[in-house]
Amino acid sequence: MFPKKQIKEAPMGGLPQFSLYRGLGGFSYVFQNLSISQLILHYKEVAPLYAGISRLSDAVASLPIKLIDSTTKQEQPTHPAYTLLQRPNRDIQKVRSEFIRDWVTWYILTGNVYALLTGRRTHPPLEMSLLNPLFITHSSHESFSFREAFSSTSIKYAREANNGNYYSPSGLQEAYHVINFNPELQEFSPQGTSEIASLFYELNHYIHASQHNIGLLNNGARPSGAFVAKSKDGSPAILSDTAFERLQLQLNNSYIGSQNAGRPLLLEGGLEFQEMQVNPKDLDFAVLKSQSEEQIYKNLGIPVQLIMSLKVTANNMANVRLEFYENRVLPLGNAFTAHLNKFLLARYKNAETLEFIIDRDDIDVLLPNRILRRDVIEKSMIMTINEKRREFQLDAILDGDKIVDPNGRPIAGQDALGTVSAPQEPGKPPVPPDTQDIVLI
């Protein structure tokens, strides 16, 4: 625990807020929760954060999603719910990929998603869109207010106990709130935790390193130094105010900045330039920036090999992409379809058996896993032919309720091979059972 706060620094440009505390061991920088506006600012200003979230949201948006009947496993491409997902609204998310991209972006960035359905609640929705969490204020767990951009008017949404969704006073707008896990969740302010909240220090490191590099660029990428005025006999001298101002103007106009890099310095009589050491060293900042960038990608669940220029073979890249999809992209996609099934399909009649799913067989990255799974099922000695066919969503066949070995011989079922007696030659005793052709299950 830290004692009473001594100093609180104001935010510097795009830097997040932090507090400086005086503890027993001296001053310490302490993390503060970032507001949604600060999170959005980081998303726009920190290049690896923008690149990582964009790469992840685009990957989820590209997943093949189907609407099927869970009992018959048949696709329902003409159902109104599937049509609405393909064209959610006429304004911001005009197509499915844009809707899913924005959903995932808001979820990662703020830990909250507010999906909005329009139309009478007893009828199928007319449009589906997303509310900007920046303009939402929770007065309690039972309601929140949404302020439209560039407007002072707000719409209050009240929570209904039956389904947990929020409705506008007119009843023509239904809001569905998705909350990421928050260990500090409070009833009066149900807000999820941003997935980039743990990147507080890494974002600060990256911004400070970038500002340091820009400072070097503006100063010609040279170590700082001092001008020393000396008299003819070598003793220190003092410049007049006019000479001092003229020297400053000459440096700013002719020697500072990337466009003046490498220009020789012209000094008047009596002036000497003495270089000074830079602390921290430039190399330390370059390494710090690279480490911060790598940590940002790791926190987002993106293998750095997919973005940063590292030496990887084609085989390793395939494994990296497979791991990225299995452990990061597909879980986000499955969560999206689960929420879609809960709040969207509930508005349609006779949709109890319908569900949105991700068609894993249509994802090229997962091809090695599909081949391995197919081989394992085909060689299985505990599944009937029809059970194997059902795993691949194929119809049953006649005489398919039997188990066969890799050679196609039945080993279980009506036509299973039991003990096959060997032919007995005249005058010889019968062949004992342990030497006969016996197939064990």
Image (cartoon, helix red, strand yellow):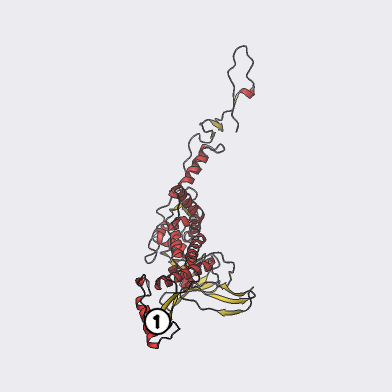
Q: Residue at x 57, y 80 (%)?
A: 7
Position of 362 relative to 141 (above/below): above
Q: Quadrant of the C terminus?
A: top right
Q: Position of residue 159 (x, y in %)?
A: 53, 70
Q: Quadrant of residue 41?
A: bottom left
Count all numbered tags in the image, as a single digit: 1
Residue 418: x %, y % from top left: 59, 28
Judged left or right of residue 266, residue 158 is right
Residue drawn at x 64%, y 23% is: 433
Of the pair 211 and 168, the residue shown nearer to us: 211
Q: Residue furthest bottom?
A: 241
How would you rate the neighbour count of disc 1 (Cα within 10 Å): few for under 14, some for 14-19, many for 20 or more?
some
Say what secondary structure mark 1 lies in.
Answer: loop
Q: Nearer the viewer, residue 84 or 223?
A: 223
> Does the rendering let one see residue 207?
yes
In the image, what residue occupies the spot 44% across and 54% down?
63
* Residue 320, x across and y down, in percent: 48, 52
Residue type at mark 1 is Gly
Above or below 163: residue 334: above
Residue wearing tag 1 = 270
Q: Is residue 354 above or below residue 202?
A: above
Does 51 sit above or below residue 211? above
Q: Nearer the viewer, residue 66 or 29?
A: 29
Q: Is residue 427 left or right of residue 318?
A: right
Q: Residue furthest front?
A: 233
Q: Quadrant of the N terminus?
A: bottom right
Q: Position of residue 316 (x, y in %)?
A: 47, 49
